[in-house]
Image (spheres, rainbow, N blue to C red):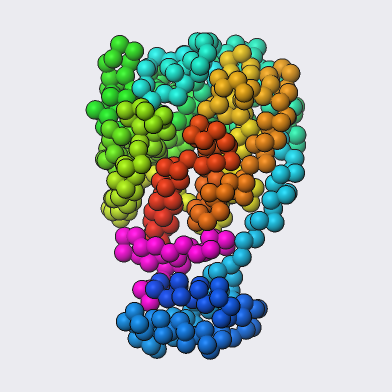
């Protein structure tokens, strides 16, 4: 499978199965579909590297190029170039991942990450919150140290021989239960040497309760911090107010700036959400950059279709154009020495995730689990409160192994809509929770999310090309 597109003046060709990216001229770009058709129709011998390109294939494709107005000799040279890339295993490659399908289903997994819902309560009333102001379809509650300790014991026990473990303190707002966060970090550290483990703690916060004492602890113990902010003041305050209705922008921005600077502008993200009310979200990304932040993520809201702020299918063309505009703007800033890392435009073309991660994604439901304040286990934080996905408890372990096995078996090859998608090995089939919420099937996909992801991959590759 080959995907070709133009972006910001570049002619880009992605060989999906090998991951090879080629920046080509207009003639090669125009001839590629004809060359691919020649292969599909059997006009060429798809043999080994020593084979010569069949002359009839050259003539057929060259004649197609001449009809498009390209010089005959340049078309011949372009076809030779295309053939050399094919022989080198860099173009028109076969799918080498499909053989892993059964191995993916049968593989033994260990739990390597927990999302600890340290607080099912919040001091903000964000309009788009999937957790209903922190309650998650249930009751307001704080996790006790005893439950958190049992969760870390569960993680150590279920992690097998894996050394590196991840724990994210999540909510609601985790700083509302700060003493327990500190106790659990200390307990986790006490487990590292005797069990040969290394904990990587992270924190997601709305920033309201940040202070110097918390900042000092976070900088010492947290590998990453996610700071929630949506962008411009009017955008942020519209969707992230206090419960009394007043905006929270002015309360958090100075604290975030101080924290980001204290971490040397690394190992954190300011993380925002854009909605139908700010489809010009590139302005919010640039605003955050102007505030001095260098690690930025602004993501599309995922909401029921009847929500006034939900993204609708008719909004998609506008959003795709906005991603193109943002990519060009960030490239210009990089050239000016003011570059930032935008999460959705970061892509590794040389290495990237291992095969299992390319096929199955985040590992929700088998390698990654969410833990409620009372210790219940769910596939991830977005399933919390949906009782059909209750998998067990940190004290009893996983009792619904059928849920675990269903998530473990899910991959890009169990999702029909991923079959012809060029981005499938970058998004790994998309979010299981979004698929369930929109279609009732974790092996389905969220179509709007897929369209936006494809554009983000295109922009990310273009930016890589521009920086070479």
Image quarter for residue 258? top left
Quarter of the image with the C terminus in it: bottom left
Q: In this view, does 72 lie above or below 368?
A: below
Left or right of 392? Residue 3 is left
Q: Residue 77, position in %: x, y? A: 44, 84
75 inside magenta stretch = no
- Residue positioned 73% across, 49% down in the render: 103
Q: Residue 91, position in %: x, y? A: 54, 69
- Residue positioned 34% across, 44% down in the render: 316
Q: Nearer the viewer, residue 48 or 386?
A: 386
Q: Please say whether residue 333 is visible from this viewpoint.
A: no
Q: Residue 413, position in %: x, y? A: 62, 50
Number of marks in the rendered image: 0
Q: Which of 279 and 233 is in front in this view?
A: 279
- Residue positioned 74% across, 43% down in the render: 107
Magenta-drawn segment: 1-27
């Amino acid at each position: 499978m080959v995907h070709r597109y133009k972006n910001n003046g570049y002619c880009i060709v992605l060989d999906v199965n090998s991951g090879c990216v080629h920046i080509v001229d207009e003639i090669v770009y125009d001839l590629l579909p004809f060359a691919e058709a020649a292969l599909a129709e059997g006009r060429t011998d798809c043999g080994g590297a020593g084979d010569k390109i069949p002359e009839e294939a050259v003539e057929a494709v060259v004649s197609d190029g001449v009809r498009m107005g390209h010089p005959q000799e340049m078309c011949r040279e372009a076809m030779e170039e295309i053939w050399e890339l094919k022989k080198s295993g860099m173009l028109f490659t076969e799918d080498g991942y499909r053989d892993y399908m059964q191995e993916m289903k049968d593989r033994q997994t260990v739990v390597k990450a927990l999302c600890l819902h340290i607080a099912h309560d919040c001091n903000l009333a964000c309009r788009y919150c999937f957790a209903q102001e922190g309650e998650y379809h249930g009751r307001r509650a704080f996790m006790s140290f005893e439950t958190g300790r049992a969760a870390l014991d569960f993680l150590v026990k279920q992690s097998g021989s894996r050394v590196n473990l991840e724990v994210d303190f999540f909510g609601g707002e985790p700083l509302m239960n700060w003493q327990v966060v500190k106790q659990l970090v200390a307990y986790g550290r006490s487990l590292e040497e005797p069990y040969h483990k290394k904990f990587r703690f992270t924190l997601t916060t709305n920033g309201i309760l940040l202070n110097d004492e918390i900042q000092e602890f976070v900088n010492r113990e947290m590998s990453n911090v996610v700071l929630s902010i949506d962008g411009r003041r009017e955008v942020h305050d519209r969707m992230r107010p206090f419960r009394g209705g007043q905006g929270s922008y002015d309360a958090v921005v100075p604290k975030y700036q101080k924290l980001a600077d204290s971490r040397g502008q690394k190992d954190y993200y300011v993380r925002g959400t854009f909605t139908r009310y700010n489809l010009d979200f590139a302005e919010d990304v640039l605003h955050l950059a102007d505030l001095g932040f260098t690690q930025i993520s602004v993501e599309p809201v995922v909401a029921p279709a009847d929500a006034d702020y939900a993204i609708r299918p008719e909004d998609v063309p506008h959003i795709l154009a906005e991603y193109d505009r943002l990519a060009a703007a960030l490239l210009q800033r990089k050239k000016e020495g003011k570059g930032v890392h935008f999460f959705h435009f970061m892509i590794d073309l040389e290495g990237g995730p291992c095969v299992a991660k390319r096929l199955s994604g985040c590992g929700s439901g088998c390698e990654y689990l969410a833990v409620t304040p009372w210790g219940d286990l769910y596939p991830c934080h977005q399933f919390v409160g949906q009782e059909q996905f209750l998998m067990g408890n940190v004290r009893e372990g996983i009792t619904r192994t059928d849920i675990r096995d269903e998530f473990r078996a899910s991959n890009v090859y169990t999702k029909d809509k991923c079959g012809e998608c060029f981005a499938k090995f970058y998004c790994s089939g998309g979010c299981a929770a979004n698929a369930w919420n929109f279609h009732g099937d974790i092996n389905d996909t969220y179509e709007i999310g897929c369209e936006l992801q494809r554009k983000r991959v295109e922009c990310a590759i273009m930016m890589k090309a521009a920086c070479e």
